[in-house]
Image (cartoon, rainbow, N blue to C red):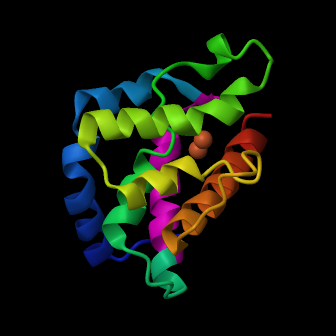
Amino acid sequence: MKLKPEEEVRLNHILAPIKNDERVQDMKNYIQHGRITTFEHVESVTRLSYWINKRFHLGGDDRVLSIGAFLHDYYLYDWHETDDGHGLHGFSHSKTAKDNAVEHFGIGKHTQSVIESHMWPLNITKLPRSREAWIVCVADKCVSTKETLLCR
Ligand SMILES: [Fe+2]
Ligand SMILES: [Fe+2]
């Protein structure tokens, strides 16, 4: 999965203000899977989402897609500590991430729905309702599976 130089420039341009925010940088302090931090995880999901959108000519909006993907796990806590094996994190974190993203960056409805529906089908009622939401939902599952297998 490789982005073209002009795609790298475009992606960096869209994400720079978000990526450099210290609250977003805080995702480097939390582990997602194995040794992968949440920051590394969302970066991988964003790049894969961008790649899928371009290579398959899906026509998703670059900004909604990239910002939604980068903030899809913006819940800002260590789920290994808070979950206690109840599995509630899986159900609740997409809403927490969306609420943080709204509060910190004022993201619009379209981007909010990308974040909120990324855990479908676990959150069965939060069906992805746009092509950007479907792309992020699929990309997150691919990246998460790879990260989980790598840490075994
Ligand atoms: Fe997630
Ligand atoms: Fe994720």
Q: Residue furthest bottom?
A: 57
Where, quadrant-wise, is the N terminus in this rendering?
bottom right
Q: Nearer the viewer, residue 14 or 2?
A: 14
Quarter occupied by residue 14: bottom left
Residue 104 is situated, as x and y percent measured from the top left of the image, at 27, 34
Q: Is residue 46 left or right of residue 82?
A: left
Magenta span dominant secondary structure: helix
Residue 47 is situated, as x and y percent measured from the top left of the image, at 45, 61
Residue 23 shown in magenta:
no
Quarter occupied by residue 94: top right
For the point 64% across and 13% down, which residue is it?
82
Q: Nearer the viewer, residue 36 or 67?
A: 67
Position of residue 48 relative to residue 6, above or below, is: above
For the point 21% across and 50% down, which residue is it?
16
Q: Is residue 21 left or right of residue 118?
A: left
Residue 56 is situated, as x and y percent measured from the top left of the image, at 55, 85
Magenta-tinted stretch: 32-52
In this rendering, does residue 36 appear at all? yes
